Image (cartoon, rainbow, N blue to C red):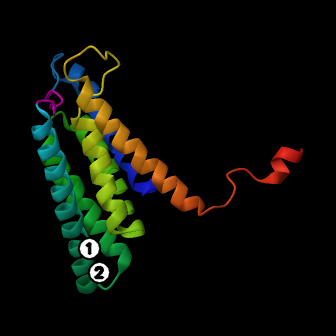
Amino acid sequence: MLIGCLLGSSVAFLLLLQRRLAAPLMGGLLPEEVRFRAGSVPAFVEGLLADLVSGLLITLSQLVFLLILRIVLRRDAAALAVTWLYGMVLLTLIYGRPFAVTIPLAGLISLLGVFCWARFGLLAGLLYWLAMVMTYDYSMTLDLSAWYAWSGLIAMTLLLGLSAYGFLVSTAGRPWFSDSLLDD
């Protein structure tokens, strides 16, 4: 859970970086604005559930695609490389121009996704998707008087809660700091 949240948030950061790096190359215009997921509470819950379902479908389809490639190619490295290349081409086509910015970032995003799915599996892949969508699509702002601030606060609270739960489960009741560090 913790790895999925970390990688998904990193990908959202890379997507925002892609928008900022692409702006000067496109004459100062940003390719697309961040989508606002703030309306009514039922619309927020509906969007969150839709993101959960789409994340599950995307993660399952990527894992099945990877499994089929492993069976057909009979080599893990080749299957991972083809999955990475497929993801990179797909992301490049989705994000479009300028290709000087899009291709390297699409390659890195695809690499993080393939690493998450292949190494950590379904739950990490689902949380990877959710963390990416919640960080990128839900409007985060420090201006708490803005009308859309509540949706970003709820999304960030959910993401931090999932990360905290993942951290607590990963420590499995062990002390967070060893006694030897405190004795020195």
Q: Is residue 78 above or below residue 8?
A: below
The residue tagged with tag 2: helix, strand or loop?
helix
Name the image quarter holding the N terminus: bottom left
Q: Give 125 or 31, whichever is nearer the viewer.
A: 125
- Would residue 84 appear left or right of 166 to someone viewing this image? left
Q: Is residue 169 above or below residue 63?
A: above
- Would residue 161 appear left or right of 32 to someone viewing this image? right
The residue that appears at 42% across and 68% down in the rendered structure is 119
List the single residue furthest toward the front.
Answer: 41
Task: Name the amino acid type tagged 2.
Answer: Arg
The residue that appears at 16% across and 58% down in the rendered structure is 53
CA–CA distance in space, label 2 to label 1: 6 Å
Q: Is residue 92 above or below residue 111?
A: above
Task: Name the amino acid type tagged 1.
Answer: Leu
Q: Is residue 57 magenta?
A: no
The image shows residue 103 at horizontal and vertical percentages of: 25, 44
The answer to the question of whether label 2 and label 1 lie on touching residues, with beta carbons closer than 8 A, is yes
Q: Magenta residues?
A: 31-39
Q: Give 55 or 76, whichever is nearer the viewer.
A: 55
List the single residue furthest toward the right.
Answer: 184
The residue tagged with tag 1: helix, strand or loop?
helix
The kind of secondary structure the magenta stretch mainly shows is loop
The image shows residue 174 at horizontal and vertical percentages of: 67, 60
The image shows residue 17 at horizontal and vertical percentages of: 32, 31
The residue that appears at 42% across and 42% down in the rendered structure is 160
Residue behind mark 1: 66
Q: Is residue 163 visible?
A: yes
Q: Is residue 6 visible?
A: no
Q: Quadrant of residue 97?
A: top left
Residue behind mark 2: 70
- Please rate how many residues cluster around mark 1, counting C-alpha atoms within 10 Å: few if below 14, some from 14 to 19, many from 20: many
The image shows residue 56 at horizontal and vertical percentages of: 21, 62
